[in-house]
Amino acid sequence: MDLAEELASKQRSISVAEFFEKNKHLLGFDSPTRGVITTIKEAVDNSLDACEEAEVLPDIYVAIKRVEKDVYRIIVEDNGPGIVPKQVPFVFGKLLYGSRFHQIKQSRGQQGIGISAAVLYAQLTTGVPAVVISRTGHNSPAHRFELMIKTEDNEPQILKEEEIEWDRMHGTRVEIEFKSTLAAKKRLVDYLRYTAVVNPHARVRADIDGEKFNFERASDETIVPPKAIAPHPHGIEFGTLKRMAEGSSLKLKEFLIDGFSRVGEKSADEIIGLSKLKADRKSDKLSSDDLKALLEAMQNVQIPPPPASVCLSPIGEDKIVQGLDKEFELDFVRSRTRKSQVFSGHPFIVEAAIGYGGKLDSEGSAQILRFANRVPLLYQQGACAITNAVSDVNWKSYGLSQQGLPNGPVMILVHVASTNVPFTSESKDAVAAIPEIEKEIVLVLQELGRELKTFLNRRDKSRQAEERARAVCSILPDIAEKVSEIVKKPVPDITPLEGQIMRKVVVKKRTGNGKVEIFVNNYTKNPVEFTIYNMSADSGDDAMPKPDFVDKIGDEYNKLWKVSMEPESYWEVSYKGSAQGSVSIRGVDENKLVVVDLF
Amino acid sequence: MDLAEELASKQRSISVAEFFEKNKHLLGFDSPTRGVITTIKEAVDNSLDACEEAEVLPDIYVAIKRVEKDVYRIIVEDNGPGIVPKQVPFVFGKLLYGSRFHQIKQSRGQQGIGISAAVLYAQLTTGVPAVVISRTGHNSPAHRFELMIKTEDNEPQILKEEEIEWDRMHGTRVEIEFKSTLAAKKRLVDYLRYTAVVNPHARVRADIDGEKFNFERASDETIVPPKAIAPHPHGIEFGTLKRMAEGSSLKLKEFLIDGFSRVGEKSADEIIGLSKLKADRKSDKLSSDDLKALLEAMQNVQIPPPPASVCLSPIGEDKIVQGLDKEFELDFVRSRTRKSQVFSGHPFIVEAAIGYGGKLDSEGSAQILRFANRVPLLYQQGACAITNAVSDVNWKSYGLSQQGLPNGPVMILVHVASTNVPFTSESKDAVAAIPEIEKEIVLVLQELGRELKTFLNRRDKSRQAEERARAVCSILPDIAEKVSEIVKKPVPDITPLEGQIMRKVVVKKRTGNGKVEIFVNNYTKNPVEFTIYNMSADSGDDAMPKPDFVDKIGDEYNKLWKVSMEPESYWEVSYKGSAQGSVSIRGVDENKLVVVDLF
């Protein structure tokens, strides 16, 4: 058949750059709008990873500048360790080039695809080369590159290289220009905000087409960078074992101890015994059948799970709570970090938090914040194992209504950290449905759900108590009147009593006997902080305690006291004088405040 | 900083085979169970594509044989044009190697990844090399290869190559062995069945661990293979235009006419006029700015859409209906093939069908059959644009209840054919949410929905008519009795009347005056076909019409007439005789049949 020859003439090798150029949607470049977010995400991921490895507190600058009608220039700059000049063209101008692909540890980027894909997208849509500036320390000059990718063979093309002056001592700056829109600006700001929440050690400043955003660091501790570990004997594939054995000249026992996580003398002996191989066989001399026996034996020996504490870097319960509280001013927030688990030999940790009330929208479904290896996931919520797991929890038993997702002013954060996060696609939008991971998420949410329920019950109880108190207060004036009639005294002021029943902050001012007194009772169950403003003709020179600030306005003195009170406590101030003046309070919710001028 | 140097030492290039070995879930190898389906799907796709190019009616054999406990050998063999020996190692042993990547036409496979990924998966899980046999015609010997992939550089490794005897004149056979299960057998059989439905020109035989399946071809016409077209000026990217221009030594005008679909003299002049470039400029001498002006101009000139009829191969309305009806014996089925449309410069056609009743399950959601370029999509239904579009249609207005998907005994088939189907991932499970495609699907379903509604209304009307008829029939005996009392005659037989009212097939036999007569009235609105069995001592030698078959059993004659009747028509037979005997009818639903022995 001549046809076979004809078909053969059309056969050819496709470079990985050609492949991803044609299938750019697989990398998160489906549309110009999304392209901006993907580019910034990839660049910021790289910056955070690099700073972490260098144990530097990240200081990242992101900018989007409009160049013309629908063309934007995207800039991301960091204070990381920089990239040596000879590597720059490969890191930015070649897909599948990187340092983390073969390392077993938690990192944001892994494949060495992301940022080069952005360079590829730029040259496809505008033909403008990427500009990269990098400097590795004060002894080295900064280098500036103009780069493109030769699509046909996936190799970098250097259009220009020069040494330049740069004020950063070390760091990297990348500028990429492509057709785009700012239609997804809100999502972009969300991305930066959530990145700050789960990277409290990072400062992120952004200038989005002129509008400035600043996410300050919440913590000055650098993260201890996760360390790479050896593969774990459980869950290793035959092909990987074969490659490891072929590449080692050690004897079998040393090969096992040296090449694998958690394998010591004892486990190695046990594995070798089960496999019926000799301990002094050279690993590179093992046949396929030998290796099959070895693999089988490895699966059947008890070996502790991989050392997750070394290779993973969870955010931590306190840091999550801090971050969320800063963002949403929640009425309730709890977080949990679970112990590490394993799927197919890869260690992983699930962390989660639930927040309630505060600035959260009380209408509609809960807000789900998804993270993987400290990176916010922005797209494909419906296709993500995290979302599935949230829907799998029976929220009704924790006091929330539910239609798939729970409803109400609820926020659920889930972070999956792993040496190998299983994403559903190379655009890293959604975690794949791995049963072990889904189970952990459900468990942590159930734990948190129980705490949420306790909070909601208590809140409901205090609401009931408030309603009862309100009922009592509404008949208090009548009771007071009746009693004063009977005992034939004037009707007393019942406001402080009301404050006490209703659990409020009650402020009373009394003027008489040549002095002015201000009494405060905090009847609430919470500590309160507020400022008392007292404006009168009296100077308050002898006041005890002294005012924190006095301002003379015309003939009058405005005296300020900053007061901080424990729950159910008492505070007072007095000074010589007779002026009536006024008292006002700032810092306490009006509903929680009763101010009484006695006379 | 020394750290930059240290990091640099870890930087390296990752081969695409290493990448996909680590990310095998991206290619549909998430689990051993799924691996089987993906492998067969990729091999069958290749077979169908090859047969189509060779204009051969495909004859495909699929087998899964258990080798040991959890290891299966998967075999796919076709009668395609075969592959020339020097190409075999690359086609099966190198990812991103193929003939269809750069061609703009509808095809099942495109990237040159699928089948090599299966070889990679096999060597990873069992280390067993793939076996490939191929022969390109009766003048050439068959070649047999044992192949693996060198993961580190994505190049084929030939373990063995030999010429062998093979009974196929031309074709290809691949055998791949890996750890697996048959847990997804039902899904696999569904895959084969649906493949047969949308490829009615293909014969598919399967042997799944001993169980045989045979899907015969429903049509003996070969498919006219789609032809590759040039890119369309609308929707082309800057980078692609630049590459085309750099690679051409033609003058601008010829470059446009030659290089693009649908650009003739007039459009070329118009584009050049708008771009303000000179028509005789050499394409490879155009600057970036020139090309930007050219691209802008190309978008602003009216150009007919790409020639979809050449490069696309829809299944066609009749073929879809045939395929579905054979499978489900539906009460109602309609299909529509829409006109071609364009997204981002890629032509596409949407076809759809709706079926109702028959063997479909009347409980639960509609069954959705999704296809892309004649390949059934089996996974990730929830993430697919087809499913979204089905949910977007308001089915209530077409007489179906709906919760997201419509409910009831409904089947919805959607086929998207395109030169570039936008999948959500490289495992090709779901069509991405492209607005142009979703809109077409909604439109075609609305068209079909209206027809379904007409059917359901008519069915409801005929149900009402039947109920009324039933009411009439229930009082007929009383009326007959009263009337016979009044006219003083014996009560007549009202059965035929009942048959007429109820729209049934009424068969009457009368014996008397030395002859036997059988009368049949088809009162239904449909043509009917059935067989009359008449068993009696009469031979029926003189019967008019003659029996189609006579069988003497003991002293009796079993006489058979095959009868085919138009709606509301009459048929009779008579012969000499006097024996009572029996009459029975086969082929008419009992509910639709009345048999009366008059005397």
Image (spheres, coloured by chain):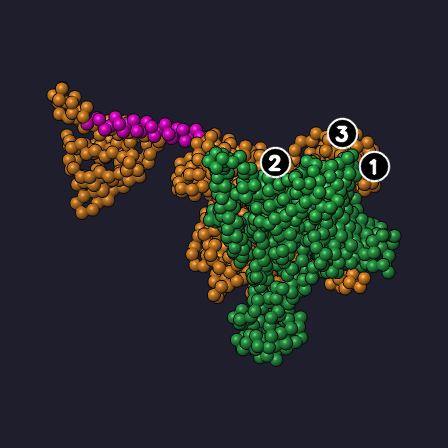
Chain colours: A orange, B green
Q: Name the residue tied to disc 3.
A: A270
Q: From which residue to which does the magenta span run?
A: A453-477
In the rendered image, residue B485 lying in the magenta stretch gets the answer no
Give the mark nearest the N terminus, 1 or 3: 3
Task: Name the residue rendered at 32%, 32% in the picture.
Answer: A565
Give the mark nearest the N terminus, 1 or 2: 1
Q: Tell me the mark number nearer the camera, choosing from 1 and 2.
A: 2
Q: In which quadrant of the rendered view does residue A1 lie? A: bottom right
For disc 1, the neighbor class at 10 Å (few under 14, some 14 to 19, many from 20) is some
Task: Name the residue rendered at 49%, 46% in the picture.
Answer: B461
Q: Name the secondary structure under disc 1.
A: loop
Q: CA distance from mark 1 to mark 3?
A: 15 Å
Q: Name the residue tied to disc 1.
A: A281
Q: Is residue A133 left or right of residue B97?
A: left
Image location (x, y in percent) of residue B55: 74, 60
For disc 2, the neighbor class at 10 Å (few under 14, some 14 to 19, many from 20) is few
Q: Name the residue tied to disc 2.
A: A436
Q: Amino acid at mark 2?
A: Glu
Residue A284 in sight from this viewpoint: yes
Q: Amino acid at mark 3?
A: Glu
Give the mark nearest the N terminus, 3 or 2: 3
Q: Tell me the mark number nearer the camera, choosing from 3 and 2.
A: 2
